[in-house]
Image (spheres, rainbow, N blue to C red):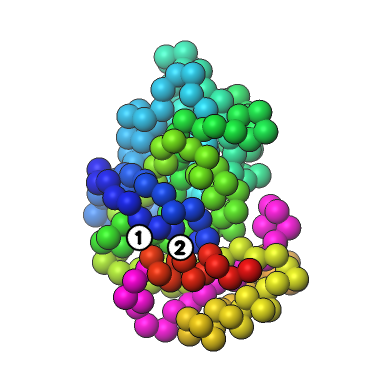
Amino acid sequence: MRIARKFFLNNLVQTSFKLIVSRNSSFQMEAKNRGKAAAAKAAVDNHVKTSQVVGIGSGSTIVFAVQRIAERVKEEGLSVICIPTSFQARQLIQENGLTLGSLDRNPKIDVAIDGADEVDKDLNCIKGGGACQTQEKIVASNAKEFYIIADICKQSKELGTTWKQGIPIEVIPSAYRPVQLTLEEKLGGQANLRMAVKKAGPVVTDNGNFVIDWQFQSLPQDWNQINQQIVLIP
C-alpha cells in the first residue's frame, strides 16, 4: 500500500488518497477477479469500522468491496451506513442487505471506496469510465478518507497505456459542443462524445448528463496542470 497526494482526471476533486493494489500476474478473468477481491478485502478489512458512514463507488471492483462489507456485517455485527455513487451502487447496497443512506441525511462520510480505470507510476488515476463521475466526485469530496482499489491490470507506467478511451469528462448536454471545442483548442487531441451501445444517441449518466472522452495526442508533462485546466472549463 502506497500513499500519495494526487489529482483525479475525471473532473474529480483534488484529494489525498490511498491506492490498494493486488499484484496478480495472470490476466485471465478468474485471476483478475481474485485480484479485485483481494484488493477489496484489504480495503474493507483495514479501513471500514463499525458505526461509520461509508461511500460506495461504482464499477466491477466495487462489487467485491460491498460483498466483503456484507460478510463482516453478518460475521461481526458491523454497523455501517452506505452512501451510493450511482444507481448500480444503490442496487448493490440493497441487494446485499446493507443500510442505504443519503448525502442529505449523512453529509459527512468517514471513508469512501472506489475503483479506477488506470493508475500510473506516480499514482495519477483515470476514473469515470463507468460514467458515474459526478456522484463519485461528490461522495469522495465529503469523505475523510478515500481509498482506490484496483487489480494489477489497472496499473501502468504512463496513463493511456492500457486505458485507450481517453479522459472521461461529464458535461451538461447543452454545453457538450463548446466543451469539445475548448478541449481540442487548448489541450489538443480529440474530444469524443461517448455514444451508447444498443441505444441510439449518446451515453446518458445517472444525472442526465453526457460524457466526453478526451484522447490526448502526446503524454502531458504535468497531469496536475491538465486536470486544473479541465476543471476550469465551464
Picture mark count: 2
For the residue carrying disc 2, how many other residues have a C-alpha within 10 Å: few (<14), some (14-19), or many (20+)? Answer: many
Residue type for callout 2: Leu
Looking at the rendering, which quadrant does residue 41 occupy? top left
Q: Is the stretch drawn in magenta largely helix, strand or loop? A: loop
Residue 138 position within the rendered picture, expressed as x and y whole percent measured from the top left: 57, 46
Q: Residue at x 56, y 55 (%)?
A: 133
- Left or right: residue 230 versus residue 35 is right
Query: Magenta segment, which residues?
Result: 205-223
Q: Which residue is mark 1?
A: 124
Q: Is residue 65 visible?
A: no
Q: Which residue lies at the image location 73% right of the left edge and 58% below the top edge?
A: 208
User: What is the CA distance from the residue labelled 1 to the residue labelled 2?
Assistant: 8 Å
Q: Nearer the viewer, residue 94 or 50?
A: 50
| In the image, residue 184 above or below residue 74 | below
Q: Residue at x 36, y 30 (%)?
A: 47
